Image (cartoon, rainbow, N blue to C red):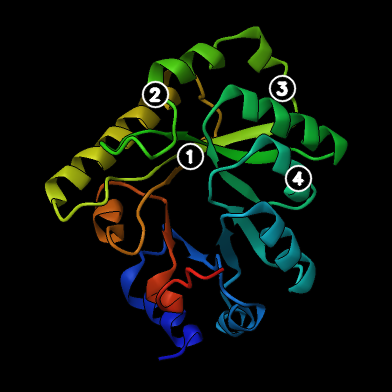
Amino acid sequence: MGVSENIKHFLSTEIPSNVKLIAVSKTKPIELIEEAYQSGHRIYGENKAQELAGKHEALPKDIEWHMIGHMQTNKVKYIAPFVSLIHGVDSFKLLKVINKEGEKSNRKINCLLQFHIATEETKFGLDLNEAIEFIKSEDFQSLKNVNLCGVMGMATYTENEDAIRSEFKELVHIFNELKQSYLTDSDFKEISMGMSGDYKIAIEEGATMVRIGSLLFGARNYNK
């Protein structure tokens, strides 16, 4: 099956209607995303700001672009004017930069707080206490150009499904804790977790967004 058919198949059989599919197009050429676009799907995820900016420029403007990779503070400016959602906010410093760039672009930028739920040290993310500390601060209250929409996390890369499930449960617990006590706004509703290898478990555990690349576009091109 081609990319367009893969997406249609996923949306009709694999992904419930209440879960958003983020088609991870990182490293993929414009032509392949155009093919995916023909399926009617409009939500795509990239992990490099400058590549994302270039694709936004080249492709139709009704695409909803998600920044799913580790976000460096000096790269926020490239995507601030148009990005639909930044998944990986892993520090208050980054959130403040996003707010500043949102102010320059005269828009409120939607963000997810990224939490470290995996056993792997290489993964980025906050811990719950760290997040609560800055959410309660006066500095946080002054941020008018960011909108916290939920949480994101990446499970450990392992065959152990119980371990993966446990990590996703932890992210849901973090989401519930923040939602009930600190971020009670109706916009705070997203749980972004699950990729090609573990999205089924993520959906079972309450994901509202899954980030899928290789199952839609084929194996990743590591040469780029």
The disc label shown at residue 214, or none: none
Q: Are marks 2 and 4 in contact (CB under 8 Å)?
A: no
Q: Closer to us: mark 2 or mark 1?
A: 2
- The residue at the point 57 percent across, 64 percent down is 44
**Residue under label 3:** 143
Q: Which residue is drawn at the image coordinates 27% and 58% (left, top)? A: 198
In percent of width and height, residue 5 lies at 45, 87
Secondary structure beneath label 1? loop
Looking at the image, tell me whether mark 1 or mark 4 is earlier in sequence order.
4
Secondary structure at numbered mark 3: loop
The reply to whether dot 2 and dot 1 touch (C-beta < 8 Å) is: no
Mark 2 or mark 4: name the one nearer the start of the chain.
4
Report, in whole angstroms, how far the alpha carbon at label 2 lies from the one at label 1: 19 Å
Q: Label 3 near label 2: C-beta < 8 Å?
A: no
Secondary structure found at label 4: loop
Mark 2 crowdedness (10 Å alpha carbons): few <14, some 14-19, many ≥20: some
Q: Please, what is the three-letter code of the amino acid marked with disc 2?
A: Asp
* Residue 11 visible at all: no
User: Spatial distance from mark 2 to mark 4, Cα to Cα?
Assistant: 25 Å
Q: Amino acid at mark 3?
A: Leu
Q: Looking at numbered disc 4 in the image, what kind of residue is underneath it?
A: Ala
Residue receiving disc 2: 127
The residue beneath circle 1 is: 189
Q: At which x and y percent is residue 158?
A: 20, 52
Residue beneath label 4, please?
Answer: 80
| In this rendering, the label closer to the viewer, 4 or 3 | 4
Q: Residues within 10 Å of mark 1 (few under 14, many from 20)?
A: some
Label 1 or label 3, whichever comes before in sequence order: 3
Q: Earlier in the sequence, mark 4 or mark 3?
A: 4
Residue 169 location, quadrant: top left
Q: Quadrant of the N terminus?
A: bottom left
